[in-house]
Image: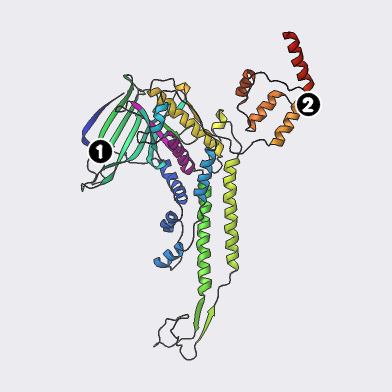
């Protein structure tokens, strides 16, 4: 399925490690979402990135102040809720029987497809972009999936082919394990994988590794070139790489769906720090000494304890306590932020579904702050289906017979018994057709899809209408007479 050759001499590759301008623009936003999802320790570890130092504050005082507050765990809980909603109902996956055995190990690293799919969805929700390279293993004689997180998709190019934008090159940063230089354990080694189409539209894969890992900044690499082929013919026309981003599966980054919640979580964190700091100051108070004092005496004054303070003749001391009115304002603002975070989560969950099959609909919801979970679900389904089509092509199967569709209905629409009875009475009264009734049962999560339900009704045995006792006796008598 592939041919390889190595350029054994290290060669300089200018620009290989460079990042796309859009990557640099959105990377801080993605990092903000990563940190807030990870939570308390990560946010505090970031230090002044999320909490500024006060004027004339020492480093020890700053560290004590930022450690004093607890981080409101909003982004992580929202991510869990969104992911749970996506998989409340099982996805609908249509795959040929020849692919089914591969689902237990979809990445040739032991990952079941069900877990791989949830990782794709989690990354898409957290950062707004994730990618899958549908690669082929000559050793295992089968395709497999390679997952790439947001930060690994470093650079890319597109070209117009047949009136549409096609990915013509993508530069991926990978971390692989290698024996440590000491001979004990392992070390992480960085390499770059470049997937591209040549001028004729032929797909080429190149892997660049540094010959000397002791110098991670070295710009010389050993290049391994692979020309993938299917049954002896080169893979042509499109890179088997799927980027789960916008609904058009573009590699272009966008605002992460959790960005607004991450920003509010950080605002809540800063207010919590201010609140704890104010409480500390209020509990400690402040001691002010009035008068020049005695230059022979220590300038240190103690509050409580076993030591006695000695003041110069004519000096006086006053204790100033913190007034707590501002604490109520901080508390109120924190509560308002928590309410806004909840509303944002609900808006993502309940935003109206868009029928994204139209060209106009493909352009909507490009801002992560307004993206609904329904449109995200559609985009993930679109990407997974495209991955499976590439997979089928590697295996020489019909790529049109595969699909993978995630749940897009996150609200419980199940009909209550009273509502079902009321609709049945409408049918019996002639005010509602049986067809509409069956469709409503499906929408109300009572029955299977209408077409399946009608087929089952048509094939079920005839019903025996119950009769009264006299009718039953008459029937038996008539049967006996007929037998005689």
Residue at image position (44%, 50%) is 38
Horizontally, residue 6 falls left or right of residue 53, namely: left
Mark 2 nearby-residue class (10 Å; few <14, some 14–19, many ≥20):
few
Residue at image position (57%, 50%) is 341
Q: Nearer the viewer, residue 374 or 422?
A: 422
- Judging from the image, what secondary structure is the residue with disc 1 in? strand
Q: Is residue 18 magenta?
A: no
For this orientation, the residue located farthest to the bottom is 313
Which residue was labeled with disc 1? 221
Residue 176 visible within the image: yes
Q: How is colour applied across the structure in the image?
A: rainbow
Q: Provide residue 191's location: percent of width, then percent of height.
A: 30, 39
Question: Which tag is nearer the camera, tag 1 or tag 2?
Answer: 2
Which residue was labeled with disc 2? 429
The image quadrant of residue 115 is: top left
Quarter of the image where the N terminus is located: top left
For this orientation, the residue located farthest to the front is 484
Residue at image position (35%, 37%) is 172
Q: Nearer the viewer, residue 437 or 207?
A: 437
Quarter of the image where the C terminus is located: top right
Question: Of label 1 and label 2, which has the lower sequence position?
Answer: 1
The image quadrant of residue 18 is: top left
Q: Is residue 140 magenta?
A: yes
State yes or no: discs 1 and 2 in contact (Cβ < 8 Å): no
Q: Provide residue 277's location: percent of width, then percent of height.
A: 50, 66
Disc on res. 115: none
Span highlighted in magenta in the image: 113-142
Residue 216 visible within the image: no
């Amino acid at each position: 399925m592939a041919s390889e050759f190595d350029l054994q001499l290290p060669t300089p590759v200018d620009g290989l490690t460079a990042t796309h301008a859009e990557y640099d623009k959105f990377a801080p936003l993605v990092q903000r979402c990563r940190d807030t999802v990870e939570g308390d320790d990560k946010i505090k570890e970031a230090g002044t990135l999320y909490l500024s130092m006060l004027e004339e504050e020492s480093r020890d005082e700053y560290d004590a102040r930022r450690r004093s507050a607890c981080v409101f765990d909003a982004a992580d809980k929202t991510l869990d809720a969104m992911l749970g909603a996506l998989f409340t109902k099982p996805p609908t996956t249509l795959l040929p029987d020849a692919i089914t055995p591969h689902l237990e190990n979809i990445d040739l690293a032991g990952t079941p497809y069900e877990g791989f799919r949830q990782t794709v969805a989690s990354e898409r929700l957290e950062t707004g972009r994730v990618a899958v390279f549908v690669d082929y293993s000559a050793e295992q004689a089968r395709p497999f999936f390679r997952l790439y997180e947001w930060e690994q998709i470093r650079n890319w190019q597109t070209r117009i082919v047949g009136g549409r934008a096609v990915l013509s090159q993508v530069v991926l940063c990978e971390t692989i394990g290698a024996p440590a230089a000491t001979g004990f354990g392992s070390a992480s080694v960085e390499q770059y994988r470049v997937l591209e189409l040549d001028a004729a539209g032929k797909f080429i894969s190149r892997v660049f590794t540094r010959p000397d890992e002791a110098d991670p900044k070295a710009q010389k690499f050993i290049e391994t070139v692979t020309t993938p082929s299917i049954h002896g013919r080169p893979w042509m026309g499109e890179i088997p790489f799927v980027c789960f981003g916008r609904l058009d599966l573009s590699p272009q980054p966008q605002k992460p769906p959790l960005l607004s919640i991450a920003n509010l979580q950080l605002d809540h964190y800063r207010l919590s720090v201010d609140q704890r700091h104010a409480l500390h100051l209020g509990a400690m108070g402040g001691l002010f000494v009035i008068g020049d004092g005695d230059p022979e005496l220590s300038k240190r004054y103690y509050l409580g304890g076993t030591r006695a303070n000695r003041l110069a003749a004519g000096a006086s001391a006053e204790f100033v306590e913190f007034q707590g009115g501002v604490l109520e304002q901080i508390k109120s603002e924190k509560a308002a932020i928590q309410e806004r975070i909840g509303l944002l989560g609900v808006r993502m969950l309940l935003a109206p579904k868009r029928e994204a099959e139209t060209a106009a609909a493909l352009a909507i919801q490009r801002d992560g702050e307004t993206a609904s979970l329904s449109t995200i679900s559609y985009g993930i389904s679109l990407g997974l289906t495209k991955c499976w089509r590439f997979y089928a092509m590697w295996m020489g199967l019909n790529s049109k017979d595969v699909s993978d569709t995630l749940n897009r209905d996150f609200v419980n629409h199940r009909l209550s018994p009273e509502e079902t009875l009321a609709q049945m009475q409408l049918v019996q009264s002639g005010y509602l057709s049986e067809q509409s009734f069956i469709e409503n049962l499906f929408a109300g999560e009572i029955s299977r899809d209408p077409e399946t339900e009608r087929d089952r009704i048509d094939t079920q045995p005839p019903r025996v209408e119950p009769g009264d006792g006299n009718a039953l006796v008459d029937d038996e008598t008539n049967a006996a007479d007929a037998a005689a």
